[in-house]
Amino acid sequence: MYFYNFKELPQEFVTSKYSTAFGGLLTGETIEVGLLHFKAGEGAVPHAHPQEQVMYVVSGKLRVRFGEEIAELGPGQAFNAPPMVEHQVIAIEDTEVLSCKNIVGGTGHRLPTE
């Protein structure tokens, strides 16, 4: 299958161990992309993972922290989290993002224990 509609994919909490990100995931052989939603005030606790991650804000607003560096990102803006670099995400308002992670050890967004 080559064509997908994110809204028709199974909707789930994709990394419930450390995040409230909810939506559908499209998983390929080496990359996984999620159209994910955060409600205002929700997000991801400080965490790091072996995957590189790019998160693009479709709508809404995120506060993102890498160490002491903090930025507020809105539509059209993105961040790149290198592997094993701690980061935190908090939705300032209801927010929709595209989150892209490479597959490492068979895992993208979903954690093996979930």
Image (cartoon, rainbow, N blue to C red):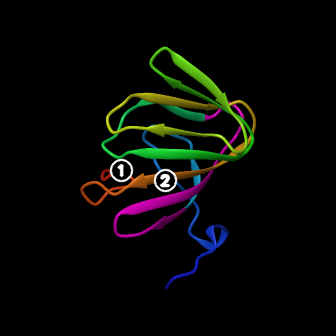
Residue 91: which quarter of the image? top right
Q: Amino acid at mark 2?
A: Cys
What mark, if any, has residue 44 been given in the picture?
A: none
Mark 1: secondary structure: loop
Nearest the camera: 74 or 41?
74
What mark, if any, has residue 100 been given in the picture?
A: 2
Label 1 belongs to which residue? 111
Residue at 46%, 47% (x, y): give it: 15
Q: Pointer 1: residues within 10 angstroms few (<14), some, or many (20+)?
A: some
Instruction: From the top left corner, tell me how far across and down residue 50 is, in percent.
Output: 30, 43
Residue at 49%, 85% (x, y): give it: 1
Q: Between disc 2 and disc 1, whose residue precedes?
A: 2
Q: Does the magenta stretch mainly form a helix, a strand or a loop?
A: strand
Mark 2: secondary structure: strand
Answer above or below: position of 99 versus 72: below
> Which tag is nearer the camera, tag 2 or tag 1?
2
In the rendered view, does 101 fall on the left or right side of 40? Answer: left
In the rendered view, does 96 fall on the left or right side of 112? Answer: right
Instruction: From the top left corner, tell me how far across and down residue 6 is, in percent.
Output: 62, 67
Check contact, mark 2 vs mark 1: CB within 8 A: no
- Does 33 appear in magenta? yes
Residue at 36%, 30% (x, y): give it: 85
Q: Which segment is the magenta one? A: 25-42
Disc 2 from disc 1: Cα separation? 15 Å
